[in-house]
Amino acid sequence: MGLCSTQLTDLTIYYDTIYASTYDGIYKKNVLSADTAWLACGLQGNHVVQTLVPDYQTFICVVEIGNTETTQIYKSIDCGNSFSSLNSIVSNIASYQFLDNIAHPEGNYDTLYCLQNQQKTYNGGTTWDAMNDVMLVNRFIKVNPENHSQLLIGGETIIFSASLQTSFDYGDHWTVLPNMYSFFAGDNALHDMAFNGTDWFAVGEGVIGKTTDGGNSWNQLLNTWSYPAQWILYIFDIEFSPADKNKLYATGDCNEVYKVPLLYSADYGMTWDTLSYNSIMKPNIRCLAIKSTVGSDKVFLGGRGVYKYENIFTGVQDKKSIKPNYYFLSQNYPNPFNPSTTFSFYLPKRSHAALKIFDLLGREVATIVSEELTAGNYSRKWNAGNTPSGIYFYRLQAGAFTETKKLILLR
């Protein structure tokens, strides 16, 4: 899909646009376009490690300083035409090339937790506080989607074994979770995690594991070290299909020079298919991003260039004759609002739906819906009453689906 002249470190999809973070700045293209043309959109000549895209005009980027393996955070509010420093503190020299150097609650880009410089902000970067951690070699930081006060940092210990630590107070105090050896095959590192309620999936050096008890015990789902020619050595990224949480995708770097590797499970990680594409060069895959449409998942893999795999679901009718088979939460209208706004969402089947409002610290402000509903489109109006002005978030949970979006109340 293009960009073969530069190495990618991150892919992000925002509605109809896919953004690539590369060693030569940020590029974008229409996510449904079949061409290989990408548009440069900021920081060309710089290694952009990670990009958050709150909206079409705004980028929050982790950027390497020269070739120092240290990073700083920059922000653009004009589509990448200009950038300003969001945090002047330079990161530690540690694993900057991995994903998720910045974590945030879903839909909330004012609350940021920055792994390498150990800083956090609740007001979009105007002020910062220190965030402590105890692990020496870190790979990623995550916010638990079900509990925004819980942060997780995964990586590797000084004796080259996988490690996961957690904080239940927004990063002030940390505890190392035990038993990571229970699903790894020896010396290893934890590279990424995906969450679905209390089920957590983790990937590392050739291994995929799952926990259902908050990380205290793990089961090994897949060990690729036993495959011929070590088919995939380092699994860097794992994601759910946005349309169906039973479907999982994982990717990374492999020992076969000309293979683009993709692992796919259609049954919630119980069994896995090993898919590959013959590349004309060593692909150095580091990340993936998924766009779901009616009838398929378009899976984009980023490394030395961008590759696309389309998973077409069998038995799906023509999209003109069926309703969507996935949940979705529409943007509220109006937004900003005063004093009331309307939320819209779609349920493809009977589900218990919970639509709630939260403040920047993850505290519940109001419950809009909490009941079992049949399949169909729904709209619910909320009058904010005496709720003060500010930035809030509304989250829909229905079945295995969860989505969060920003809400602005202006008095």
Image: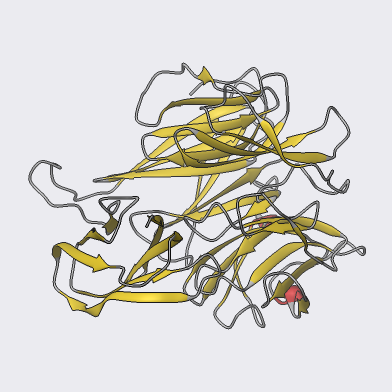
Q: Which quarter of the rendered picture does the C terminus lie within? A: bottom left
In the figure, residue 168 lies in which quadrant? bottom right
**Residue 150 seen from this side:** yes
> Which x, y percent locates residue 49?
69, 37
258 to the left or right of 200: right
Q: Nearer the viewer, residue 356 or 402?
A: 356
Residue situated in front as seen by the camera: 227 or 244: 244
Q: Is residue 319 left or right of residue 160?
A: left
The residue under the point 47% across, 63% down is 271
Residue 339, given in percent of the width and then of the height, sits at: 28, 61
- In this view, which residue lies farthest toward the front? 411
Is residue 175 placed above or below 65 in the rendered structure? below
Colour scheme employed for the rendering of this structure:
secondary structure
Find residue 290 and report its horizontal and vertical position in percent. 44, 44
Indicate whether 34 appears above or below 392. Answer: above
Image spot of residue 401 (x, y percent)? 35, 65
Whether 192 is drawn above or below 178: the answer is above
Residue 139 lies, with reference to residue 347, above or below; the image says: above
Give the total number of marks visible in the rendering.
0
- Residue at 13% x, 46% y is 317
